[in-house]
Amino acid sequence: MAKISMAVELFIPEYGKTKKTLQDIIMIILAKEFPLTTGEIAKRAKGNFKVGVTFQAIRKSLRALVEKKVLIEKDKAFLVNKEYILELRRLSDQFLRNYFTAERKNKLPTWSSVGEGHTSYVFDNLLQADKFWGEVVLDWARNLKEDEDRRFCFHGPHCWYPLGHLGTESDFLLELKENKVKSYYLVEGNTPLDVWTKEFYIEHKVNYRINKPWRELKAAIGVFGEFIIQFDYPGTTYRKIEEFYKKSSSLSGMNMAAIARLLKGNIEIKLVVINNQTIALKLKEDIFSFFRKR
């Protein structure tokens, strides 16, 4: 997986213009097909957009986009940089949240780079943080090489993710399995709802263990490859989640409206991605050790 913390210079085709620039046309072409060579891009530009451009002009525009880190050249063919796509996705999601909501937020979400090998993101609620978590992990899984470590290890309190977005969590787990990733979930919490959650993950071929006796852990940690992804629960939010799980003695007695409000509640969640092979290996081995115990 490419390093997530690189700075990406955004390039967005000009909105509303009937006449597109050559770089606009290249981006539209590569959004539909990739990778393509310079000649293939030139052929599509002339055929689909009816523009008279030289091979040299196409090549010059491609070089400019590669320098901006918008495109990547591989084996003399070009494709859009995935880090650019993720950054563009983050920006577009922020536009949607802040311009198309009925209520204007007082505090906008922020993004910042935190030192070499670290990237931090700030989200408005737990569901947003978890959605981005999934995007990062799946990007890693989709780009695994044959000889790479295919373990995804999780450690955290109460896997509420199926309660927040059941279909999305199911799709996430199925895609990990399709990419031959073996998942290991070590969970702190042993309520009836935790037991039901365990059945959900086992159905999705996840190695799932409830830590007994469970301990108080106010952070969710995922480890994959040389990466660690983590977010910490604010104290008040953690206590409310604990209360919800203790009160939910069964699925029929679960207050879905209450957990939905909690997961969608407007709180600042900082999610950090760390690129450190030594720490990642140590954490994976620590989590994996629980699965060796009889």
Image (cartoon, rainbow, N blue to C red):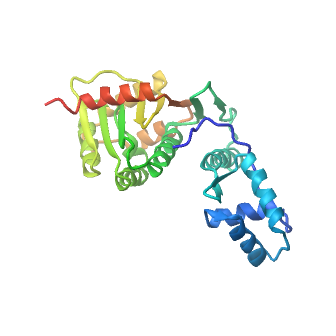
Query: How many marks on residues?
Result: 0
Q: Does the rendering let one see residue 119?
A: yes
Seen at 76% across and 53% down, the residue is: 63
Please identify the quadrant where the C terminus is shown.
top left
Residue 131 % position (x, y):
50, 45
Residue 288 % position (x, y):
28, 32
Res. 90 image quadrant = top right
Residue 267 % position (x, y):
56, 31
Nearest the eye: 74 or 269: 74
Q: Is residue 247 left or right of residue 21?
A: left
| Residue that protrudes farthest toward the left in the picture | 294
Seen at 46% across and 36% down, the residue is: 262
Above or below 231: residue 15: below
Above or below 69: residue 20: below
Q: Does the rendering let one see residue 16?
A: no
Res. 153 image quadrant = top left
Res. 191 image quadrant = top left
Nearest the eye: 61 or 129: 61
Seen at 83% across and 74% down, the residue is: 51
Above or below 1: residue 29: below
Q: Is residue 55 left or right of residue 228?
A: right
Nearest the eye: 80 or 251: 80
Residue 155 % position (x, y):
35, 31
